[in-house]
Amino acid sequence: MKEVTATGQNVEEAVKSALAQLQTTRDSVEITILDEGKKGIFGFGSRPATVKVTKIIDPIEEAEKFLTDVSEKMGVAVNIEVKKEGKQVLFTLSGEKIALLIGKRGQTLNSLQYLTQLVINRHSDQYLNVLLDAEEYRKRRNDTLTQLAGRLAQKALKTGHKVALEPMPSYERKVIHTALMSNNRVKTYSDGVEPNRHIVIAPK
């Protein structure tokens, strides 16, 4: 939320001045009249009008703008589809060089998601959870993680030793936990500190 206090000969002039400073239009601001001003007589006793104009920032629009800017700087022309469900906002990216935004094992996509989360919550009144996807990467990654969880659970049972996975973001760790929730022969827990927090699968 950005706000400026501006003055003018009358309220209308003060508002115009504030809009110019904020580089925005009347329909995206809230206007508070602090002082209507006073005309005075022959220029004596006059007082300028003072207004406070607050620019209302849409957090989702800001996040979308951020993603577009970063993508352009990486040389990727991106199309963004936005879907909001409750407190979760899904941004689906598509375009020709989209693989550049995914990166190795989704590392670039995860970093972009983290930064987008910071941007959206800087402007939002309530905490919003951001999910970034491109070319159904998340679905494919979830399928891969579910299969990996099954294989490593078997390994833990076969060897009788716990198995530590590579560090993963929290939502990917959740996929592993969920995949093995119904397996009552193993237990899963997270270990380590961010950004090296990882899942451990251990026989019960």
Image: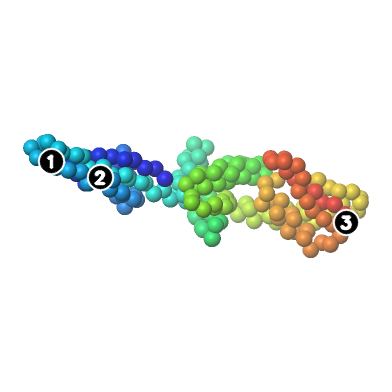
Nearer to us in this view, 139 or 153: 153
Mark 3 crowdedness (10 Å alpha carbons): few <14, some 14-19, many ≥20: few
**Where is residue 134 drawn, in percent x and y?**
57, 50
Between label 3 and label 2, give the one nearer the viewer.
2
User: For residue 204, which numbered disc appears in the image?
Assistant: 3
**Where is residue 104 drawn, in percent x and y?**
66, 41
Q: Name the image quarter holding the N terminus.
A: top left
Question: Which residue is painted at 84% across and 57% down in the image?
Answer: 186
Specify the farthest residue to the left: 42
User: For residue 35, which numbered disc appears in the image?
Assistant: 2
How are the colours assigned in the image?
Answer: rainbow
The numbered mark, 3 or 1, whose residue comes first in the sequence reads: 1
Give the side of residue 45 with respect to residue 195, left or right.
left
| Secondary structure state at the residue bearing disc 3 | loop
Give the side of residue 176 with respect to residue 126, left or right.
right
Residue 73 higher or lower than 124, as above or below: above
Mark 3 vs mark 1, CA separation in Å: 86 Å
User: For residue 193, which numbered disc appears in the image?
Assistant: none
* Badge 3 vs badge 2, beta-carbon distance below 8 Å: no
User: For residue 40, which numbered disc appears in the image?
Assistant: 1
Nearer to us in this view, 195 or 102: 195
| Secondary structure state at the residue bearing disc 1 | loop
Q: Amino acid at mark 3?
A: Lys
Q: Amino acid at mark 1?
A: Gly
